[in-house]
Image (cartoon, grey):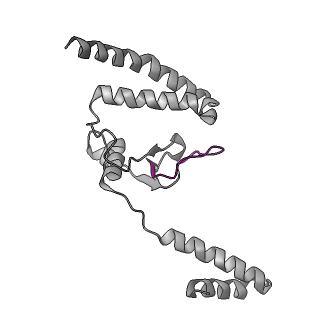
Amino acid sequence: MTSTTKAMRDYLAARYELPDSELDVMAADLAAVAQAQQQPLTLNGHQLLDALNSIAPQRSAPQLATTVCISPEPTCTVGYHVPPKLYCWLADYPKAGSIQLFDNGDQPQRPTQDVVYMATKLIECARWVYSTPDARKQPHARRLAKVILRLACPLISAHADTAQRA
């Protein structure tokens, strides 16, 4: 029994009249939670840059003052499986959803002002909405995805036509 578990057990024993077996289980559970909360969050530079680009694309003072949360689990994941990666979301708007942070340099690291890059990312998000059952059930998500596809697809097509002529 670790010192943290023993301290938790002594605390619970002083406050509650429970059998020793229950005290041991509860103390072990509380100690595990306490230890998990003390673990540092480890990010690499790619993930840090990705989080910064998502909250402060223009690097303005109000954008940089925005607080974010970073966690191994995204927000709003009721009912479906997500890959074990790092996710970032605005602290003031957790229900707005989260983004997955890229953990390597294989992902395109273009400036966020690149319109074609942003349009491509928006189209990926819209396609994700249509491919994820829980997201498809939400009318606002479907409407947003439809608008994104209607506005961004012609932009990509026009860029492709321009690139072919060049």
Q: Is residue 112 above or below residue 4?
A: above
Q: Please give left or right for residue 89 compared with residue 30 in the image.
A: left
The answer to whether 139 appears left or right of 45 in the picture is right
State the quadrant of the N terminus.
Answer: bottom right
Specify whether 113 is left or right of 90. Answer: left
- Residue 141 can be seen in this image: no
Residue 96 visible from this viewpoint? yes
Q: Residue at x 51, y 25 (%)?
A: 145
Q: Is residue 140 magenta?
A: no
Q: How many marks?
A: 0
Q: Residue at x 24, y 17 (%)?
A: 163
Quadrant in the picture for residue 10 = bottom right
Seen as rendered, the residue at the extreme left is 166
In percent of width and height, residue 41 lies at: 42, 63
Q: Dominant secondary structure of the magenta stretch?
A: loop
Residue at 77%, 86% (x, y): give it. Answer: 20
Coordinates of residue 27 in the picture (x, y in percent): 66, 80
Indicate the quadrant where residue 143 lies.
top right
Q: What range of the chain is rendered magenta? A: 74-89
Image coordinates of residue 126 in percent, x first then y, are 49, 28
Instruction: Report x, y in % for residue 42.
Output: 39, 62
Residue at image position (65%, 30%) is 137
Left or right: 103, with 72 as reference point: left
Foreground of the two, 57 or 104: 104
In the rendered view of the protein, which quadrant contains the C terminus? top left
